[in-house]
Image: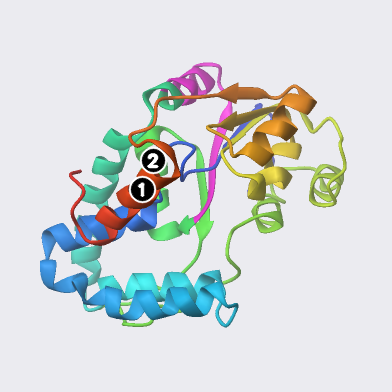
Amino acid sequence: MARSKRNYAFFDLDYTVIPHDTLFLLGNFVIRRQFWRIYYLLILVPAFGLFLVGLIGPHGLKRAFLCILAGLSAEQLAEWMDDFCARLERLAFPSVLAMITQHRAKGDYLVLNTASPQFYIERLATRLGFDEAIGSQFELKDPMPFWVRPLGPNNKQNVKLDHMRHLLPAEIISAAQSGQDQPGLAGSHAYSDSSADLPLLRAAEFRHVIQPSARLLAMAEKSDWTVHRPPLPFSGKAGKFLTALRQMLGLYPM
């Protein structure tokens, strides 16, 4: 794909456009359709323990999560993901959707760049008016296998910029990945909630943080980045944890 002559706007997804982890919401959505698929917790819980002690990586954890889709035909998966993404759109921060609309009205090239799986974020990106979606790639088969094979690295941190080499100049990517405090691409904007996205933020001239962590907030205030605080559907870390737990169990209305 040729580099666009338009200005760019890069958005993370989880806790940036949508105030939740979309994988937890995927589990919630599937269980509310077919409760028997709650079996996935028998795989996910021990996998999470292995992840915490470093025996498996992010892709291993995602594979454990995605076993919830095992046996779905390609037609079923497409139907479910269309419905899922319609529901995700309704859960998005209204103020962030307004920012997306403003960028689109200015003619900016919008990129949704996230570690979430490509097979649903590309649908969501289309619904929200993005020009391009970049996510973590997994091999989809008909029917869906129990263990989904990853295609490439987890799309996080520096990898996000590796996947935008067709959009950004090499010197911008190199400086952002090395942590240099440089101006970023002129006229571009980047949005995230997480310090894991510092490379993405540093690649843009205008840097926006959404409900940032204490660490990211300190960096944003020191560097005069724009801080956005849209209302959250939960209160504090305990509320965030309990909301995620409800979603894992299929108890969250959406």
Where is mark 1, residue-wise? 123
What residue lies at 66% left-to-right and 32% top-to-bottom?
A: 217
Residue 19 sits above or below residue 47 on the image:
above
Please tell me in which quadrant of the rendered image residue 92 appears: top left
Label 2 residue SS: helix
Find residue 139 and report its horizontal and vertical position in percent: 43, 74
Marks 1 and 2, Cα distance to the nearest angstrom? 5 Å
Q: Going by the image, does 209 lie left or right of 119?
A: right
Q: Can residue 34 be seen in this snapshot?
A: yes
Residue range highlighted in magenta: 98-115
What residue lies at 28% left-to-right and 60% top-to-bottom?
A: 248
- Neighbor class of circle 2 (other Cα within 10 Å; few <14, some 14-19, many 20+) is some
What residue lies at 60% left-to-right and 77% top-to-bottom?
A: 54
- Neighbor class of circle 1 (other Cα within 10 Å; few <14, some 14-19, many 20+) is some
Observer-nearest of 66 and 240: 240
Residue 141 sits above or below residue 91 on the image:
below
- The way the protein has been coloured in the rendering is rainbow
Q: Does the CB distance between marks 1 and 2 fall below 8 Å?
A: yes
Q: What residue type is labelled 1?
A: Arg
Q: What residue type is labelled 2?
A: Thr
Find residue 253 and report its horizontal and vertical position in percent: 18, 44
Label 1 residue SS: helix
Q: Going by the image, does 206 lie left or right of 253?
A: right
What residue lies at 27% left-to-right and 54% top-to-bottom?
A: 247
Observer-nearest of 115 and 19: 19
Find residue 180 and report its horizontal and vertical position in percent: 87, 43
Where is mark 2, residue-wise? 126
Observer-nearest of 136 and 179: 179
Find residue 55 and report its horizontal and vertical position in percent: 57, 83
